[in-house]
Image: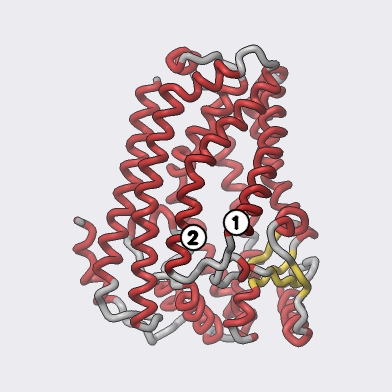
């Protein structure tokens, strides 16, 4: 059984590395072709940024594999031995926290390198070491608190409730929904400052747009994202009555009011089509199957690992394998998400009244965020929640980009 898990994880790692290699080869060739949507300097810079990140991702994947081997061959047994004589509920909380802390320590150098080397080199990073440390402490404590409560609760359910996997699923899924409700009002403000939009004219236009869509929210807020990052973004946070419109301060500096309204129209399209609830339902179905599998793991697996079949070990196995499990469903989730993006674009045109402002906004977002507009098909298939921007622009009727011949020229990269 352990050998089967090892083979599955090895294939998962192999596929991830292969996708990254394909992406590097594709973009390396594409960057030498005439640019689209960007100035030549930005085109080269965004390509180099993407390639650098893909190379880092390969290294991260190799370390992920090494960490998996560590846990499977020795680490899980080490945690079980350390917490041998503790009450099972408390043991689960301690064991899960040890697992999370070790993983965090291993992953931290990559986060630091990404922020203060790669993002700094490409002029994205605005964070300081002091702010970074504060974020890590806040995020770490919040994670450990939530993990302690959830792991102990699931352990109690495993011990006391028949069909524990079903009720554990209900608990975890309910917490996911609850966190979505609490995030914009209580969690996000722990890391960023949110202030009501001061531009009264723009605020009034946004409110009219929201009313036109039947969208009720707590208000329109500006977040000080620029203190960490130079990228542009906007989103609707929360569920139900806790929904709020959030604009990055960087977005206000770069987009015109009409372009901003077009972007918000796109986000309203997701609301109008209930995409958030559909995504939550899809995740719920995937988790349901995952917990069913977890609840029917053979005892032989625990014997081969040399650990007791305790709630703590069941939970750690779940966390160890969840990345592989979700990766299996990623193409489906990405496909659904990409289709939702096209529908949201169409709704934005409908509610805003024209496509020109959204087209202009998308082009600015690509240029400002240095998002290389072309990707290998495997990368799109597995990872892209949004269609390539050139495809979105074509669907919106933009005639200024001709790239069919470019795709033909790059097909050969599939064999790199």
Residue 289 appears at what percent x and percent y? 54, 34
Residue 193 appears at what percent x and percent y? 73, 65
Residue 296 drawn above or below residue 410: above
For label 1, the SS is: helix
Task: Determine the CA span between mark 1 and mark 2.
Answer: 10 Å
Q: In the image, is 391 to the left or to the right of 171?
A: left
Q: Quadrant of the N terminus?
A: top left
Residue drawn at (67%, 69%) of the image: 224
Residue drawn at (61%, 50%) of the image: 136
Give the quadrant of residue 290: top right
Residue 165 image label? none
Residue drawn at (44%, 82%) of the image: 397
How is the structure coloured here?
secondary structure
Question: Can residue 360 be seen by looking at this rendering?
Answer: yes
Contact check, label 1 and label 2, Cβ < 8 Å: yes
Which residue lies under the disc numbered 1? 132
Q: Residues within 10 Å of mark 2 (few under 14, many from 20)?
A: some
For label 2, the SS is: helix
Residue 271 drawn above or below residue 326: below
Which residue lies under the disc numbered 2? 116
Residue 365 appears at what percent x and percent y? 51, 76
Q: Nearer the viewer, residue 402 or 70?
A: 70
What residue occupies the far front of the structure in this picture? 130
């Amino acid at each position: 059984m352990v050998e089967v898990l090892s083979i599955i994880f090895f294939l998962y790692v192999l596929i991830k590395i292969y996708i990254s290699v394909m992406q590097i080869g594709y973009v390396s060739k594409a960057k030498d072709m005439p640019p689209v949507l960007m100035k030549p300097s930005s085109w080269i810079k965004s390509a180099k940024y993407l390639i650098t990140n893909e190379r880092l991702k390969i290294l991260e994947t190799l370390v992920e594999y090494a960490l998996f081997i560590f846990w499977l061959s020795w680490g899980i047994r080490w945690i079980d031995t350390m917490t041998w004589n503790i009450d099972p509920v408390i043991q689960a909380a301690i064991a899960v926290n040890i697992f999370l802390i070790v993983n965090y320590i291993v992953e931290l150098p990559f986060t630091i390198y990404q922020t203060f080397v790669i993002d700094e080199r490409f002029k994205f990073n605005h964070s300081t070491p002091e702010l970074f440390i504060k974020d890590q402490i806040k995020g770490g404590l919040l994670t450990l608190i939530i993990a302690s409560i959830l792991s102990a609760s699931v352990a109690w359910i495993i011990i006391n409730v028949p069909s524990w996997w079903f009720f554990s699923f209900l608990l975890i899924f309910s917490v996911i929904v609850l966190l979505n409700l609490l995030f914009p009002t209580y969690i996000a403000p722990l890391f960023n400052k949110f202030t009501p939009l001061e531009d009264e004219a723009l605020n009034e236009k946004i409110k009219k747009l929201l009313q036109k869509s039947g969208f009720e929210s707590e208000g329109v807020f500006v977040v000080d994202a620029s203190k960490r990052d130079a990228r542009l973004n906007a989103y609707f946070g929360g569920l139900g009555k806790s929904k709020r419109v959030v604009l990055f301060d960087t977005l206000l500096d770069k987009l015109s009011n009409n372009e901003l309204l077009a972007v918000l129209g796109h986000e309203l399209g997701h609301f109008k089509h209930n995409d958030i609830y559909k995504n939550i339902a899809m995740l719920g179905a995937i988790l349901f199957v995952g917990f069913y599998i977890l609840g029917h793991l053979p005892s032989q697996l625990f014997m081969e690992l040399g650990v007791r079949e305790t709630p703590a070990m069941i939970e750690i196995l779940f966390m160890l394998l969840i990345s592989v499990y979700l990766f299996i469903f990623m193409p489906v989730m990405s496909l659904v998400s990409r289709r939702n993006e096209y529908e949201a674009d169409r709704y934005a045109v409908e509610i805003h009244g024209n496509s020109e402002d959204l087209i202009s906004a998308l082009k600015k977002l690509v240029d400002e965020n240095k998002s290389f507009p072309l990707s290998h098909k495997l990368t799109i298939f597995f990872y892209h929640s949004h269609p390539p921007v050139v495809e979105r622009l074509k669907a919106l009727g933009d005639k200024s980009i001709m790239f069919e011949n470019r795709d033909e020229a790059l097909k050969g990269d599939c064999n790199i």
